[in-house]
Amino acid sequence: MQIPFDNSYARLPDRFFTRMTPVPVREPHLIAFNAPLAAELGITPADDTTLAQVFAGNQMPEGADPLAQAYAGHQFGGFSPQLGDGRANLLGEVVRDGHRVDIQLKGSGPTPYSRMGDGRAWMGPVLREYVLSEAMYALGIPTSRALAAVATGETVYREPGAMPGAILTRVAASHIRVGTFQYLAARRDTDGLRALYEHVIDRHYPEATDPADLLSRVIDRQARLVAQWMSVGFIHGVMNTDNTTLSGETIDYGPCAFMDSYHPDTVFSSIDRQGRYAFSNQPNVIVWNMAQLATALVPLMPDADAAVEAFTEIVHAMPALTQSYWRQAFGRKIGLTEATPADETLITDLLSNMAHGQADFTNTFRALGDGTAREQFSDPALFDDWESEWRTRLEQEHEPHALMRAVNPVVIPRNHRVEQMIDAAVAGDFAPFERLNHVLARPFEPDPDAADLRRPPQSSEIVHQTFCGT
Ligand code: AMP
Ligand code: MG
């Protein structure tokens, strides 16, 4: 098989990574191959056996320059100067239509950055990331994508016990993280910082003029991203600085999940005991992460004091920016083409009524456009008062129902469906995985054959916790 590689990260100083091949696995078996994405990337098709060998890391395609990237990061607020790809391997990059993307294996074996880990992944998190990242893409949210999933034929030991191992191949604009800058800044490696800065400018922000401008642009993309997450009820779950990209894409799907019934304090991740990464705290955490990026960029500026002052101002402007993206996104969800600050209480009142009425996030917004939202509330009176104010405001809009149907998904990867899919896959049945991918590829179109995927979980089906899978 042919992958048209052009590997720019591998041309950076070699202290940025460790050149190494993935560790081969015993008996690779192809679970999924995203043929449309492969075609977009100019990857020529191959038989399943070859695909399994390549995407397990057993066979290196021509032109690959495999490596594990070094990075640092704040994990739950505490700084680790040395993280890095402990279970991932960057095969290389592909340029298509002027866009450069990474092709990376996750779960591909131990690296010098593995610390205590085994460098592997079990099938659960691999299929979860496959389904969720492709669903996010279909929802129009910037994200890494899934190119392939391979079962390794090996056993991995995790919380649930002895589990089948798997490897995900993901495609991202890059895997450069806030933590990649922090890695160099923590080592006082200003030459390295400059080389990384130039690389990021070339690759993601060719129009940026200096580090302050880069910071503003990253902040803009991250503000928009977090607002988009919120607009579909998505909780990333581990917004550590090593999981926050410079590109503004969602990466590192771990214990992430979509909410069913709305509550702002919702947390799924088993390790997030303080709720640091709770649904409604995501806009605060991203500011904190951007402040860490700002700190790492200071050595690139000629005058540190002036830089700190300028960067502080830029970071302090972020909450208002996120708020405005949030307002636009939620405004559209209730049928407003251009929500103004005066419309914010209409949005927040609905959300607080939804929290009180245990309304399902996805189904309530979708039902607004269909005129059936009232049924979503445990106490429909919670909807009625709000509805009259809303209808008055809608009189100023032309086609609010068409707008709502265009932006409010019918179907999202509900947590209980994802867990049921994983249980089936572990037992050897991949039909639920294939079905989820198929239905979630068109999230705005009602599919009469997939009504079951729209239903919130019954109380016995509710998944209260999700795990990193590490
Ligand atoms: P995460 O929380 O998944 O973003 O991972 C944080 C850090 O732990 C990264 O440096 C990962 O490479 C590393 N890590 C996670 N799982 C494993 C594993 N099974 N083996 C080795 N390193 C891991
Ligand atoms: Mg990570």
Image (cartoon, rainbow, N blue to C red):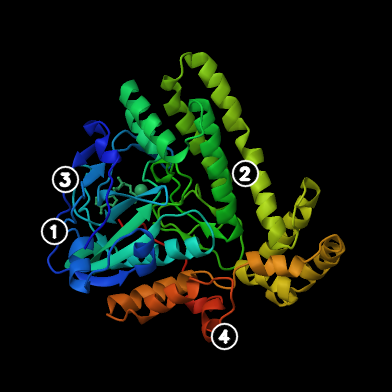
Residue in the image at 56% along x and 68% along y: 260
Task: Give SS at disc 3.
Answer: loop
Residue 420 appears at what percent x and percent y?
40, 76
- Residues at marks 4 and 3 touching, judged by CB atoms closer than 8 Å: no
Q: Residue furthest bottom?
A: 449
Residue in the image at 42% along x and 71% along y: 418
Task: Give SS at disc 4.
Answer: helix
Residue 57 appears at what percent x and percent y?
19, 58
- Quadrant of image for the N terminus: bottom left
Crowd around label 3: few <14 · some 14–19 · many ≥20 (10 Å): some
Q: Could you tell me how far apart the alpha carbons at marks 3 and 2 are, in whole angstroms?
A: 40 Å
Kind of residue indicated by mark 4: Pro
Q: Which residue lies under the disc numbered 4?
A: 448
Q: Could you tell me how far apart the alpha carbons at marks 4 and 2 are, in whole angstroms?
A: 36 Å
Residue in the image at 44% along x and 44% along y: 244
Kind of residue indicated by mark 2: Thr
- Quadrant of image for the C terminus: bottom left
Residue 256 appears at what percent x and percent y?
45, 58
Of circles 3 and 2, the one toward us is: 3
Residue in the image at 34% along x and 76% along y: 423
Is label 1's Cβ within 8 Å of ligand 1? no
Q: Could you tell me how far apart the alpha carbons at marks 1 and 4 are, in whole angstroms?
A: 43 Å
**Is residue 355 positioned above or below 243 on the image?**
below
Kind of residue indicated by mark 1: Pro
Crowd around label 4: few <14 · some 14–19 · many ≥20 (10 Å): few
Q: Which residue lies under the disc numbered 2?
A: 322
* Mark before the other along the chain sequence, 3 or 2: 3
Q: Which residue lies under the disc numbered 1?
A: 24
* Mark before the other along the chain sequence, 4 or 2: 2
Q: Which residue lies under the disc numbered 3?
A: 20
Q: Could you tell me how far apart the alpha carbons at marks 4 and 3 are, in whole angstroms?
A: 48 Å
Q: Could you tell me how far apart the alpha carbons at marks 1 and 2 are, in whole angstroms?
A: 44 Å
